[in-house]
Image (cartoon, grey):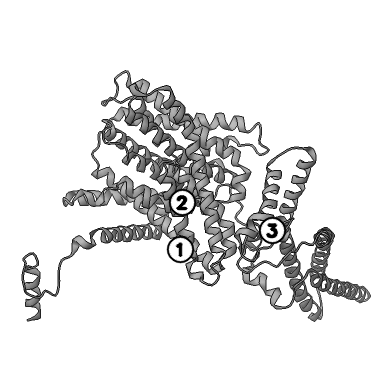
């Protein structure tokens, strides 16, 4: 009876009836969120399937596999005559919802120190390189178009509009490939930084040529060209300024959320998104805004939230970025089937050739100029990988989708853009790993610096800043030192909780030294106990232990006098060096407590629970260890004399 009632209810669903219905069909109400959820589910399952087979994931980049899935789904939906609007990516959806998480993830997790040490080179590649590629590709295609070899006519501003979007190097594709093959830090940060800022420059150029196209070449006057040149700098710098403003806002707000810690992630995600929308609202570079916001807010926000919140923010940011990236590449595959294409073999082939040639020329010329001013040069192998790593992806696809409908060549531009993306993602993305292995390019040091190297690098920074100051030069060491002093005296006390004003930010060095000293002291104490409990000690083991203790003693002598003098100077001027908070983690300390040293944050805070609070306690403990070492040496000598007698 119940089944019959349900059948009747479903059959009469489309009629107006006074009969009470248990089940109804409300598809229209849940269509959009249900479609989004299904897309995310399919994309996530696809990525899991890809990584089940190691052979497939080693050969194909994730982006290429997702495009393949999109192609398969597009064919299936086309065969079943599914409504096309369900799998069409709109430009508004792309720029307002899918792109911001990807760019924020790239900016928030950008290695700031490596970026600013190579900032000049990155800026040259991003600005000069993008302008060069846009003008070179556009001019070449326009010149060939004048001979009538293409099937569709286009104006000079229309082809420059296309060349601007096709010059956008995708950071998502670059990061994925370079992280998998573990290229060295210089190469990684140069290509990563260039691709990230290149997107902002490409969007600025795209919008400029878009306005020229809408106005019309015959209606443009000199003031329009002058205004466009000024807007190039105003849009980029204005977007960065908005991002910095909102970075200070989110840092200042999280400073006072100690009583409501659950709200921290909300501010961390919502305020950068507001920065992105604000820049978009005023016509400024929204990409530069969210990148600057993510980079600037990182160190202050991490000092205001707990380690648990830091981990939550990290994983949620990565999850959101990967989900958006996955959806974009799947839609890219779908668009290959669903879009109205105009296939022009000559235009597509020449576009791919010009993209490869002009990027290679630009990289070679720029590296030749930069190597004159750099201590570490870009090698020919580095230049090859930089030129070969110019993969196109989400940004180019989103821009070509948003192209005005009044442009007659839009279908041809869309087809060419998808072809270039597939060529770079499949051919270049798949072949870059074996090429790197064949060329034996320098790889990243996965072990990371030792504790002594980390502390020594910080000392070296201050030393080089002093040398530059004495020589009357302003290098990146002096600039970094000036910023760190500004950071210690103004920014950190203003934007971080429990942070006191200091004239000299030596807390990192002192904390690192204290933790290193205490850790080694405790390790040596445990080793000494086991050593004294042994009845007979082999001569080889004894020599190793004595050598270890002598090196430890040399370590203490190397750093103790320098740090003691610095601490006395700081006390003389009335400054304080407070203990590191449990939720503060800076770049140098992260390297020190990395996995290669077998330490964690809990391990490093353990001495404070055992009342090892001060540097003087560490020295007393080290003195006891020295006495134990001397007793072991005397014991070894007596053992040696007994062996000679026997």
Q: Which residue is the site of mark 3?
A: 450
Is 619 left or right of 295, judged from the image as shown?
right
Kindly indicate the quadrant of the structure image that contains residue 628: bottom right
The answer to the question of whether label 2 and label 1 lie on touching residues, with beta carbons closer than 8 A, is no
Find the distance from the CA under tag 2 to the CA under tag 1: 14 Å
> From mark 3 to mark 1, how far is it between C-alphas?
36 Å
Residue corresponding to mark 2: 275
Determine the residue positioned at 57% across, 62% down. 302
Rendering coords of residue 427 (x, y %): 40, 41
Distance Cα–Cα, label 3 vs label 2:
38 Å
- Residue farthest to the top, as pictured: 147
Task: Give the percent coordinates (x, y) of residue 177.
Answer: 47, 48
Is residue 161 among the parts visible in the rendering?
A: no
Q: Which of 421/213 is in front?
A: 213
Residue 570: assigned label: none
Q: At 54% across and 63% down in the image, what residue appears?
A: 254
């Amino acid at each position: 009876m119940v089944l019959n009632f349900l059948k009747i209810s479903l059959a009469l669903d489309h009629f107006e009836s006074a009969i009470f219905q248990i089940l109804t069909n409300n598809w229209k109400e849940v269509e959009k969120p249900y479609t989004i959820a299904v897309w995310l589910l399919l994309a996530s399952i696809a990525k899991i399937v890809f990584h089940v087979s190691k052979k497939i994931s080693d050969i194909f980049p994730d982006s290429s596999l997702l495009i393949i899935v999109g192609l398969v789904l597009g064919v299936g939906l086309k065969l079943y005559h599914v409504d096309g609007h369900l799998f069409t990516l709109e430009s508004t959806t792309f720029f307002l919802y899918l792109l911001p998480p990807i760019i924020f993830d790239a900016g928030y997790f950008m290695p700031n120190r490596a970026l600013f040490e190579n900032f000049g080179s990155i800026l040259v590649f991003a600005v000069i390189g993008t302008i060069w590629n846009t003008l070179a590709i556009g001019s070449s295609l326009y010149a060939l178009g004048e001979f009538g070899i293409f099937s569709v006519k286009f104006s000079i501003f229309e082809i420059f509009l296309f060349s601007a979007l096709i010059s956008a190097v995708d950071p998502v594709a670059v990061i994925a490939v370079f992280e998998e093959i573990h290229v060295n830090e210089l190469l990684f940060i140069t290509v990563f930084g260039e691709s990230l800022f290149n997107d902002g420059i490409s969007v600025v150029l795209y919008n400029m040529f878009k306005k020229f196209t809408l106005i019309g070449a015959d209606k443009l006057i000199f003031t329009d060209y002058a205004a466009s040149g000024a807007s190039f700098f105003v849009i980029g710098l204005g977007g960065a300024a908005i991002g910095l403003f909102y970075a200070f806002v989110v840092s200042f707000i999280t400073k006072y959320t100690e009583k409501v810690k659950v709200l921290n992630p909300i501010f961390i995600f919502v305020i950068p998104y507001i920065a992105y929308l604000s820049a978009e609202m005023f016509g400024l570079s929204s990409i530069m805004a969210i990148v600057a916001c993510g980079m600037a807010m990182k160190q202050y926000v991490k000092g205001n939230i707990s380690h648990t919140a830091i981990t939550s923010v990290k994983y949620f940011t990565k999850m959101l970025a990967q989900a958006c990236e996955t959806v974009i590449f799947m839609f890219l595959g779908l668009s290959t089937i669903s879009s109205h294409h105009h296939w022009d073999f000559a235009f597509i082939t020449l576009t791919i050739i010009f993209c490869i040639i002009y990027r290679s020329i630009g990289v070679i010329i720029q590296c030749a100029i930069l190597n004159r001013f750099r201590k570490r040069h870009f090698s020919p192998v580095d230049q090859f990988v930089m030129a070969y790593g110019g993969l196109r992806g989400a940004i180019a696809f989103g821009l070509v989708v948003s192209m005005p409908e009044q442009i007659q060549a839009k279908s041809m531009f869309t087809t060419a853009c998808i072809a270039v993306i597939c060529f770079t993602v499949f051919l270049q993305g798949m072949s870059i790993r074996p090429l790197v292995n064949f060329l034996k390019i320098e790889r990243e040091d996965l072990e990371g610096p030792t504790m002594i190297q980390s502390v020594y690098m910080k000392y070296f920074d201050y030393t080089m800043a002093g040398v530059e100051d004495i020589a009357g030069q302003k290098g990146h060491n002096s600039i970094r030192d000036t910023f760190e002093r500004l950071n210690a005296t103004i920014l950190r006390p203003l934007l971080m909780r429990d942070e006191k004003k200091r004239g000299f930010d030596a807390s990192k060095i002192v904390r690192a030294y204290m933790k290193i000293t205490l850790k080694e002291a405790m390790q040596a104490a445990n080793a000494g106990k086991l050593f004294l409990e042994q009845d007979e000690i082999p001569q080889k083991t004894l020599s190793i232990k004595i050598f270890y203790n002598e090196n430890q003693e040399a370590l203490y002598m190397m750093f103790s006098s320098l740090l003691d003098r610095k601490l006395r100077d700081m006390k003389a001027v009335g400054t304080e060096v407070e203990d590191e908070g449990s939720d503060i983690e800076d770049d140098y300390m992260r390297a020190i407590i990395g996995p290669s040293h077998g330490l964690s944050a809990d391990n490093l805070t353990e001495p404070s629970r055992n009342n090892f609070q001060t540097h003087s306690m560490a020295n007393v403990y080290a003195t006891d260890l020295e006495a134990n070492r001397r007793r072991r040496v005397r014991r070894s000598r007596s053992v040696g004399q007994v062996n000679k007698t026997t």
